[in-house]
Image (tube, helix red, strand yellow):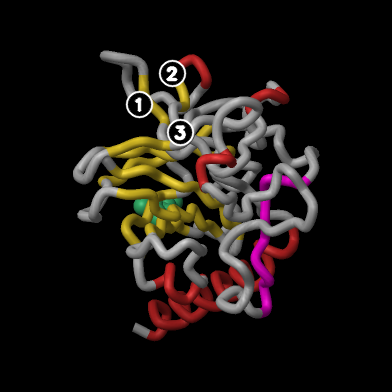
């Protein structure tokens, strides 16, 4: 009994240390794809060979032709970290000023898609969407196991919801470590699937959020 409870205390203390330390130190990732389609008849494979992306986050720079998992060095970086001290007051999406590649809301929202950018996700209620992200060395057992949260706005009001509002509209929780097996821990492709909940027809803000990092996409529900 005594042994068991001191063990739990140790586990809780270790987790606490990791959760306050890991995000600021080195953890980062981003939504590489919002609507990943596996090859027909293929198994769940998140690698480039296993399927293709048919819906992206805002201003995802497909024209740059960057290899999967290598978007950390472009400007602005894909890995937008919300203010760690006050995530609920920080904007839900990357608003890097003047940056044509930021994830701020475009007007119209469709201007952040197509051409040099990836296409917008077009889906229906009840459809399954699969998001993809790079492990960035954080799918190993030695790292804190943070969950990927998916939020979907409920209203279309011409501006993005605040983070507080998005937190009320959590539609899925995904296992960050659901990754392909591979030798390159940094570039291991990972992903998870979820169902599109009931919404009236229209375009909504979808946020992918993990360990304080956030990616934003607009999804059109037909
Ligand atoms: C990590 O967390 C996910 C839930 O997000 C869970 O499904 C998974 O089993 C956990 N993995 C480990 C190794 O604890």
For residue 50, the mark is: 2
For the residue with label 3, is its CB less than 8 Å from the closest atom of ligand 1? no
From this view, report whether residue 213 is shown above or below residue 61: below
Disc 2: CA contacts within 10 A as few (<14), some (14-19) or many (>=20): some
Quarter of the image with the C terminus is top left
Number of residues whose C-alpha sits closer than 10 Å to that of mark 1, classed few (under 14), some (14–19) or many (20 or more): some
Q: Position of residue 210 (x, y in %)?
A: 53, 57
Mark 3 highlights which residue?
55
The span shown in magenta is 76-85
Inspect the magenta stretch and tell me whether residue 84 lies in it.
yes
- Badge 2 or badge 1: first in the primary sequence: 1
Query: Are the two marked residues, 2 and 1, in contact with CB atoms closer than 8 angstroms?
Result: yes
Of circles 2 and 3, which is in front?
Answer: 3
- Beta carbon at label 2 within 8 Å of ligand 1: no
Q: Rounded to the nearest whole Å, what is the CA distance between mark 2 and mark 3? A: 16 Å
- Residue 172 or residue 156, whichever sits in front: 156
The structure residue drawn at horizontal position 66% and vertical position 57%, both measured from the top left corner, is: 94
Closer to us: mark 1 or mark 3?
Answer: 3
| Disc sitting over residue 44 in the figure | 1
Q: Quadrant of residue 36?
A: top left
| Secondary structure state at the residue bearing disc 3 | loop
Residue at 55% from the left image edge and 35% from the top image edge = 113
Give how far across and how far down residue 171 sits, in percent: 32, 58
Residue at the farthest bottom position = 2
Left or right: where 26 falls relative to 154: right
Viewed as shown, does residue 73 lie left or right of 20? Answer: right
| Residue at the image point whose x is 41% and y is 49% from the top | 175
């Amino acid at each position: 009994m005594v042994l068991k409870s001191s063990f739990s205390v140790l586990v809780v203390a270790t987790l606490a240390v990791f959760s306050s330390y890991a995000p600021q130190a080195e953890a980062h990732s981003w939504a590489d794809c919002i609507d990943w389609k596996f090859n027909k008849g293929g198994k769940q494979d998140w690698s480039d060979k296993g399927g293709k992306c048919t819906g992206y986050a805002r201003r995802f720079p497909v024209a740059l032709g960057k290899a999967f998992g290598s978007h950390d060095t472009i400007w602005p970086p894909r890995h937008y970290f919300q203010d760690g001290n006050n995530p609920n007051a920080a904007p839900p999406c990357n608003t890097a000023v003047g940056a044509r590649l930021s994830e701020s809301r475009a007007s119209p929202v469709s201007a952040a898609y197509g051409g040099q950018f990836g296409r917008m996700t077009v889906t229906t209620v009840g459809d399954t969407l699969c998001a993809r992200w790079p492990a960035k060395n954080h799918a190993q057992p030695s790292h804190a196991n943070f969950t990927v949260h998916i939020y979907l706005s409920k209203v279309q009001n011409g501006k993005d919801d605040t983070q507080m509002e998005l937190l009320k509209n959590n539609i899925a929780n995904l296992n960050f470590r659901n990754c392909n097996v591979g030798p390159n821990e940094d570039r291991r492709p990972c992903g998870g699937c979820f169902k599109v909940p009931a919404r009236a027809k229209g375009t909504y803000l979808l946020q992918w959020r993990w360990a304080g990092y956030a990616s934003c996409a607009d999804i059109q529900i037909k």
